[in-house]
Image: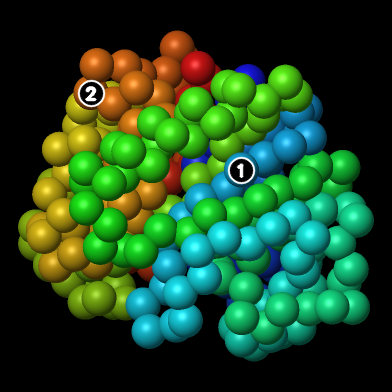
Amino acid sequence: MLTAAAFVPSPPLLVPQLASGAAQETDRLRRAALGVASRLGESCEEWTAFGVAEPGLPFIAEVGPESSGTFQGFGVDVRVCLSPDASAAAVDPSMPLAALIAAWLRGQAAPASKVRVRVLAPDTPADQCAQLGAALRRELDARRSRQALLVVADGANTLTKKAPGAFDPRSEQVQAALDAALAEGDCGALDHLDAALCQSIGLAGRAAWQTLSAVFGGEAGGPRKSESLYVGAPYGVGYHVGMWLP
């Protein structure tokens, strides 16, 4: 049975060893992400995480809880595991970023938990997101043990001139709508995110957000309670940390 869902962004700078001089600047974001991970760990020990594949890298659809990875590709060999039973010695250098972030949060905030990770293609159509989310909800509710969901996804990466995708004047309005939908538990607003527009403004997490909506019933549904712990764009990328309760 699904007990709680949390959502966090995917910047490697969440990991203090990778943040270097930016550690203080990202401290509030980091504390919020660790906070929701800790709350997931308190709710149950079995998590399903999902995020969106990184452009240009090999597509890995699923990562099991026996897996370990490293942030070596981002500059520092910080090793992480998706469960307490995973071997830190057998490190997968190709572990997707969404899995790395989920594993790091688990290790820091909920070390007794185990996580399986599913990765979506960035261009997954909205109707397929709806099908995936509905199927995932059925799967989680069918399990006898308590289940938690962790969404690892970003907003637009074009919010300022120094953002990774440069500045796009359309991104501010779309990001504001996304933040409001996550804060208010508005599945309908997530369902209506325009895939082409999101792609053009670098809102790579669109498929993950629409899958989250479907987990909670889509436009006709929604969470019983929604909560935001962090909303910001410190590097011109929209980051949101929060929780939804079914």
Vertical placement of residue 136 versus 162, above or below: above
Q: Residue at x 40, y 24 (%)?
A: 216
Are there few (<14), some (14-19), or many (20+) residues within 10 Å of tag 2? Answer: some
The amino acid type found where label 2 is placed reads Glu
- First in sequence, mark 1 or 2: give its number: 1
Visible residue check, residue 28: no
Q: Which residue is mark 2?
A: 219
Tag shown at residue 237? none
Report the side of 43 relative to 139 (left or right): right
Q: Is residue 124 left or right of residue 149?
A: left
| Residue 217 in picture, x, y percent from top left | 34, 22
Structural crowding at the residue carrying mark 1, measured as other residues with C-alpha within 10 Å and reported as few (<14), some (14–19) or many (≥20): many
Q: Picture quarter containing residue 167? A: bottom left
Circle 2: element type: helix
Left or right of 137: which side holds 101? right
The residue lying toward the viewer, choosing from 1 and 38, is 1
Residues 215 and 139: in front is 139
Type of colouring? rainbow
Tags 1 and 2 touching, CB below 8 Å: no
Q: Residue at x 43, y 45 (%)?
A: 240
The image quarter containing residue 191 is top left
Residue 136 pos. (x, y %) = 48, 36
Give the residue displayed 20% in from the left and 32% down from the top.
189
Cα–Cα span, label 1 and label 2:
22 Å
Q: Which residue is mark 1?
A: 48
